[in-house]
Image (spheres, rainbow, N blue to C red):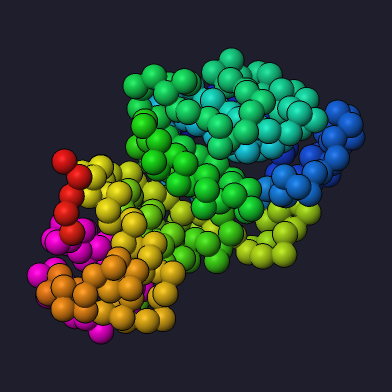
Amino acid sequence: MTNSDQAELGPPSRYNLTDPRVVRDLMRKHNIEAQKNFSQHWLVDRDALDAIVNAAELTRADTVLEVGAGMGVLTVELGRRAGRVVAVEIEREVMRGLRDVTKPYPNIEIYNTDLLQVDPVDYFGDTPYKFVANLPYAITAMAIRHFLEAAHPPTRMVVLIQREVAERILAKPGDMSLLALSVQFYSTPRLVAKVPAASFDPPPKVDSAVIALDIHPPPVSEDLKARLFVIARLAFAQKRKQLHNILPGALHMSPTQVREWLDAAGIAPDRRPQTLSVEEWVRLAEVDPRPRKA
């Protein structure tokens, strides 16, 4: 980072939030106990924190949404770089610590709500925003899908998630899943950093990873998108079978119809769902011979 870049940063936190002792002292100060049902594992690794904020590529012109803000270790760093930060946290007890550590940053707004209830339009209108978060493991897929499918999606998502889930999202044809298809339909994902369990306090039982998703418009219309995902969900439900054995029964079509359909899409009938690319799923939806709604 250059001197000019450093000059653009807001003041550093009054607390060293990557020091587990400092976080525990803050929790005692505000009478906060880690709630297992909210997957509270505090990030205490400076390198991992830097990887997240650097991948977001923030300037003072940026607006940011953070969900699952916790004790504010990421929130503060976002507030130091971005023009406006909306931080969401569901746990009421944690809010006391979060308000304490973010007090010096007037550009940080804090809301006590469920991230899955957040409609970005309510907070940003039509203003572009970036999404940066350490996501709770239990709802990672739901959270990513919620914001990718929002009426006003972010321009970029940078998320710290379970490493196994990150690998599924980043999968290539041959190892694709419905999750990989769903994320890659809306974005181009890339691995930013691997994060060991020891980077958290208390450490979870699994390692994590930081990934960045650059969002792009869906490649097909809403009607074709709905059709594509109906086909994909049915296919991935029987992913060990070949497509010519899945689609006739799943879609009430004759084997001949299905083979002609696959041929028109340029897809061999003995392919399995996990081998198809996003582009091939799109072609399959585009040449679907079934009647379409008026």
Q: In the rendered view, would you say 70 is above or below 281?
A: above
Residue 107: where, in percent of width, then height? 54, 18
Q: Residue 174 in the image: x percent, y percent? A: 34, 77
Q: Can you give x and y, in whole percent of width and height, for residue 48 in the image?
A: 58, 52
Residue 179 inside the magenta-drawn segment: no
Along the line of sight, which residue is nearer the eye, 150 or 42? 150
**Residue at (45%, 46%) from the top-left corner?**
145
Residue 278 on the magenta segment:
yes
Boundaries of the magenta span? 262-289
Between 44 and 287, which is closer to the camera in this rendering?
287
Q: What is the quadrant of residue 127 in the picture?
A: top left
Image quarter in which the C terminus is found = top left
Residue positioned 58% across, 20% down in the render: 109
Residue visible at 68% across and 61% down in the picture: 197
Judged left or right of residue 275, residue 12 is right
Is residue 238 depicted above or below 137 in this figure?
Answer: below
Q: For the image shown, how many numbered marks are present on the structure?
A: 0
Front residue of this view, candidates 177 and 96: 177
Q: Give the residue at x 48% y 21%.
A: 123
